[in-house]
Amino acid sequence: MSSPTLELELPDGTRLTVPEASTPLDAARQIGPGLAKAALAGRLDDAWVDLRAPLRSGGKLRLITARDDEAGDVIRHSAEHVMADAVKRLWPGTQIDVGRSGRDGKFQYDFDIPVRLGRDDLPRIEAEMQRIIGEDLPFERQVVSHAEALSEFEKQGEVLKVSRIGDLAADAEITLFRHGSFVDVCRGPHVQSTRQIGAFKLIDISGSYWRGDESNPMLQRIYGVAFGGKKQLKAYEARIEEALKRDHRRLGAELGLFMFHEWSPGSPFFLPNGQKLYNALVGYMRDRHEEQGFQEVTAPQVFSADLFKVSGHYENFHQDMFMIPEPDGGEIALKPMNCPGHCLIFRSTKRSYRELPLRFNEYSRLHRYERSGTLHGLTRVRSFVQDDAHIFCEPGQVPDELDAFMAMMTETYKALGLDGIQVAVATRPDQFIGEPGDWDRAEQELYEAVERAGYPCGTNPGEGAFYAPKIECNFKDVLDRVWTLGTAQIDMGAPGRFGLEYVGRDGADHQPAMLHRAVLGSLERFIAIYLEHTGGDLPLWLSPVQAVILPISERHEAVAARTCQALREAGLRVEADDRSETLNYRVRSAEMLKVPFIVVVGDAEAENGSVTVRRRHSREQRTLALKEFVETMQEEVRTRGVS
RNA sequence: GCCGACGUAGCUCAGCUGGUAGAGCAGCUCACUCGUAAUGAGCAGGUCGUCCGUUCAAAUCGGAUCGUCGGCUCCA
């Protein structure tokens, strides 16, 4: 009678037969002692397996070593434990909560530490971690029952951990990992020994609410990065440095696009160059909407609080609004959204089904009171404009309108060369208006629209607006933070609350469906993401300064001025730089402002009415007739080419 | 709003444990008049975020406040 075995297939195709309940480490030993020593974890059919966990089935086994790209994932996991151990060693009485390791090399751990730590304490923790790594402590894996896990941490007085274990099912098998005297609940996998943590660095410390709830006490969270080797750590640091160069806040200042002032926190000033970019974008969206049957309107900026009592904002959005008490005891508010105004326009006259879908778009400035700690450059502001529109239609027309939204969104982002969009449906939040059944149907319609448009669709549970579920178009900024740009929402409250009606084919009154949608979302936020996406190298049609004219010397100033004027009259945004500086100096200055065309005029050009042009990022200089240059530029602007 | 850090000339930064501020770039002036990434010289520029306190004396120490940055929470 032979004992049962498992069949494993190795990456090179060879097959390995091991006794049942062997561990990946056992398999590694069979392959060779070198591999067994270097192995960090295993992948069985692409799922992580801990080296010490008995295999439950055969399959394709890959042993991960520091040389593999995925090594970092395992190392970070173990680095979390080592960091937690270090903090406990340094500050006895520390309660550990949980750690997490994410993408991009980062890991974190939350603690309740008896003292407040600052960044200055990080080197001390790093040193302690280094000591633990030097101790070469093996990670031990242990599977225990729920009760055993509870008693383990109760014994240690780990109140937070006990509470976390309480979340797990009573019949769950719990895996513990130990190294030295430190133990934590963890699914794994972990490296074999602390020594295998190749390179790490603690990067920051911050607060975080216990269980993510701001009514709970605040814990201290420490962030770090860890990799298989020093080289990856260096690469990470270089990547962050590069990313920072593309930060829209930095580019905004360097290119003279926008600024902030402490007397109006979170409210951007668009400087002349920024306003040109802004106007170009709005102009583009105006055209797109007009083509698609939208009608632009402008509603007031300030309304009586009564409007928002009807819309539901007063009860559900109050702390996000700028409310102003009036001398006579009334209350007025800066509008945080355009929708209530559009509802008033809709019901200003008797509407017929023949008018539907009725699409109103608006570029008013919206104001929302965002808490001070949430403000962030142009991505999170208190004053912004959306390419916003509301569609009033018959309920049966909703799918077509959603399809049109998805199409416009796809086309617009494509035209701008912006990729990396993530689409998700944000569902009913805890605080909402309307009927749950209607929400379910609306959410379903949104999912179907995303699917018809061919996008993979995620779900952001409970992230919908209080009045509508929404399709969200999400993008990451240069430091991997996710921001929502475009959205499409099906309103669950406004048509009823505002008593909106239209006369149907049947002569009876019906309630219209109402959609909210914005393709770029907040223009401010869009500009931020787009600047980071392009690194400030905007396509010609969006460049604030499309060309700069450089006279070779003083005697060419008049030609430069004439050339500049001719280009301006052709509708191009052009400036002449006739400062008393060397040509090289002025070329450099134009380069740093990321101007797409550098145009030089000297004796030769003055003589025959030509210009010598060099495109940014090109080394080639072309001399051509001014007229020809104008036409080339106009054509590129007209077709909104993306380089 | 909460936790932590930061706040010195337009920008980037120096200024050790308290003795009333310094550089580079930008700006201005003069000279140079130049063919695609920094010509040279000179000048000017700051009540050290703000307020209160400690001290003979505060950019430096303490407190408060505002703003910014990194997170948390919240959100386009």
Image (cartoon, coloured by chain):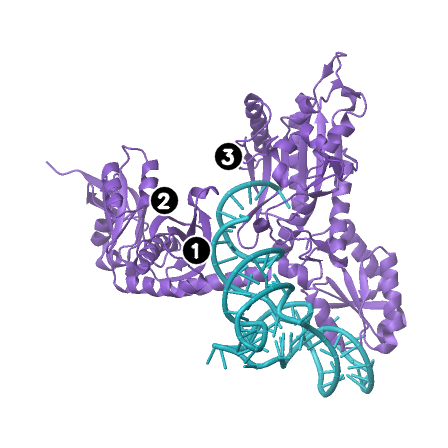
Chain colours: A purple, B cyan
Could you tell whether A442 is left or right of A267 in the image?
left
Q: Quadrant of residue A624?
A: bottom right
Label ID, residue A458: none
Residue topped by disc 3: A461
Percent across and percent down for residue A443 are 56, 28
The residue that label 2 is drawn on is A46
Q: Dot 1 surroundings within 10 Å: few (below 14), some, or many (20 or more)?
A: some
Disc 1 to disc 2: CB gap under 8 Å: no
Secondary structure state at the residue bearing disc 2? loop
Q: Secondary structure at mark 3?
A: loop
- State left or right for residue A265 relative to residue A94: right
Q: Which residue is mark 1?
A: A105
Image mark 1: chain? A
- The answer to whether A352 appears left or right of A536 in the picture is right
Sequence-wise, which precedes: disc 1 or disc 2?
Answer: 2
Number of the front mark, 1 or 3: 3
